[in-house]
Image: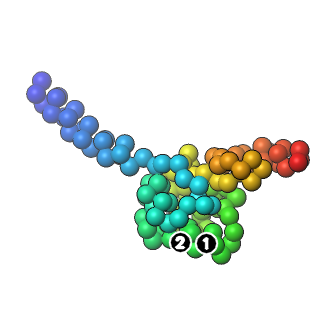
Amino acid sequence: MFNKIAALAVGLMLTAPGLLLAATPVNINQANAATISKSLDGIGNAKAEAIVAWREAHGPFKKAEDLKHVKGIGKATIERNRSAILLADTSTGKDAVDEPKHRQRKAADTE
């Protein structure tokens, strides 16, 4: 019985850091490097600075997948943070989670 309780306690201790490191929503088109690195899982200062540099050189990100153009950011990092990656919604002025292309086209057609 003690072994089961000890195993459960160890499992909880190993799981807790993952819960604490969950991504926090951030607008990657407006946030500075420090905010991006604090908000996204697996993005440190160097990668966050690379995100800001890419954005300044090429303009705002249109979809979360555009982060793949930043050196050191791959598909797994994007997927892990997808729900926390916000983009500026220029039509409403609000932040929005990356929307499917068919919704973006519909919005553009109605304007």
The amino acid beneath tag 2 is Ala
x, y percentage for residue 26? 54, 53
Q: Which colour scheme is used?
A: rainbow
Above or below, comparing residue 37 to residue 20 in the picture: below
Viewer can see residue 43: no
Q: Is mark 2 on a helix, strand or loop?
A: helix
Residue farthest left in this picture: 2
Horizontal side of 97 relative to 84 (left or right) equals right
x, y percentage for residue 37? 45, 61
Horizontal side of 69 relative to 39 (left or right) equals right
The 10 Å Cα crowd at callout 2, few under 14, some 14 to 19, many 20 or more, is some
Above or below, comparing residue 28 to residue 15 in the picture: below
Q: Which residue: 42% across, 64% down?
A: 44
The amino acid beneath tag 1 is Trp
Above or below, comparing residue 72 to residue 4 in the picture: below
Q: Which residue: 47% across, 55% down?
A: 40
Horizontal side of 62 relative to 44 (left or right) equals right
Residue farthest front in this picture: 93
- Residue 78's quadrant in the figure? bottom right
Above or below, comparing residue 70 to residue 107 in the picture: below
Q: Distance between the residues labelled 2 and 1?
A: 6 Å
The 10 Å Cα crowd at callout 1, few under 14, some 14 to 19, many 20 or more, is some
Q: Name the residue under label 1.
A: 54
Q: What element carries label 1?
A: helix
In front here: 110 or 19?
110
x, y percentage for residue 102? 79, 45
Q: Mark 2 points at which residue?
A: 50
